[in-house]
Image (tube, rainbow, N blue to C red):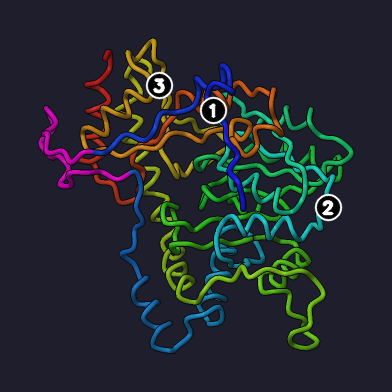
Amino acid sequence: MLQPHELTLEEMGDLAEIIPAKDPEVRISYRPIPDFDRPSARSIIPVCEPTLDGNELKYVQQAVETNWISSAGSFIREFEAKFAEACGARYGIACANGTVALHLALATLGLEPGDEVIIPTFTMIATINAVTYCGATPVLVDNEPDFWQMDVADVARKVTPRTRAIIPVHIYGHPVDMDALNELACRHGITVIEDAAEAHGAEYKGRRAGGLAAAAAFSFYGNKILTTGEGGMVTTNDQEIARLAWNLRDHAFSSERHFWHKYVGFNYRMTNLQAAVGLAQVERLDELVAARRQNAALYTSLLRDIPGITTPPEAEWAKNVFWMYGIMVDRGAYGMNRDQLRRVLADNGIETRTFFIPMHCQPVYWDAFKGQRFPVAERLCRDGFYLPSASSLTVAEIERVAAVIDEACGG
């Protein structure tokens, strides 16, 4: 029987200080916000929710009426083509979710035990799990403090003769410095695969995430800018990676004859129903991204002068899509810490989420990275959380969130 990896806060020593408290209970609130004439009509503002008021229902109905509801059907092909085009990539390979998209991209490389894959410690656990599924060894690097992305200088320090791949994660919708990373990888003959799960529509020097490396992996989970409920996509300009990914996602059936297999494949297919939703979503990508950026601009204008609050950065070479609008809380300057502010927001009907807990702090990977420290990632974990971030947020809801944060300042 599978047993959990147990880890107590006492065993973590001073790292225990960065581990967030349990999520506070969000209470229904009808409390009016002073000085605002347009309070939110909703008593609870969720941290994120999908926007499904385009052609989603129409396309799903078409899929049902034609009986194409499984992993074959025209919506799969259309969604793959349209999303790849939106990323500036030649090929799109739709699959079951973002985690398997990343695993699928890595699987095309033929990784073996002893191969190393460099990833940031500050990421969602799917990134490191996908490496582990391949039997490779994950190597962790820190994030840089300016834009919260993978520290390319730390990557350079961690490259060894065993390094086969690097996975930059475009955290919260802001791209990694890809030119520096790609130059480093090219010099050492290393493959770069973007984890673009959070970066639909993000741009690096005018080029879209998803077309910045050998391949990229996207998620279409319900809280993503584009969603299919569950779902994922590999994008690439490499014909051989695309061929292998298409084959591996469907049990690696052979073109020579059915039930004839030359690879160990996976059942990672997306359904035509999901792709119908995805096609309707990608039709509105620019609109949904514009809403995220407009909401972020309003949040920043309302929060940037509050002592102790750091708003999310954007490099001059980047287009941040603000998948989640994250802030940092300096306890000394603000008057309370991140967890205390989250409780205040929850008491006012506002749902939030903490930033990711770094991989070197996870119980399941504790023994592998015990003793390693990553100060930027640890500070992000200790002080950061994100506010309601859906594309459908109203001005009044953003004003309500900002007003509670402003009122709470000073404790």
Residue 303 point in image, percent of width and height: 32, 26
Considering the whole magenta stretch, tell me its main secondary structure.
Answer: loop
Disc 1 marks a residue whose amino acid type is Thr
Which residue is drawn at the image coordinates 61% and 68% (left, top)? 268
Range of the magenta residues? 27-46
Residue 400 point in image, percent of width and height: 21, 35
Q: Compare marks 2 and 3 and give the one earlier in the sequence.
A: 2
Q: Residue furthest top?
A: 332
Image-based side of 137 in relation to 44, left or right: right
Helix, strand or loop for disc 2:
loop
Tell me the CA gap for discs 2 and 1: 33 Å
Tell me the CA gap for discs 1 and 3: 25 Å
Disc 3 marks a residue whose amino acid type is Val
Image-based side of 307 in relation to 76, left or right: left
For this rendering, which residue is in front, 17 or 76? 17
Q: Of discs 2 and 3, which sits in the foreground?
A: 2
Q: Of discs 1 and 3, which sits in the foreground?
A: 1
Q: Quadrant of residue 107?
A: bottom right
The residue that label 3 is drawn on is 329
Helix, strand or loop for disc 1:
loop
The residue that label 2 is drawn on is 112
Image-based side of 71 in relation to 168, left or right: left
Would you place residue 41 above or below residue 403 in this image? below
Residue 357 point in image, percent of width and height: 53, 33
* Label 2, residues with CA under 10 Å away: few <14, some 14-19, many ≥20: few
Are the residues at dot 2 and dot 3 in contact (C-beta closer than 8 Å)? no
The residue that label 1 is drawn on is 8
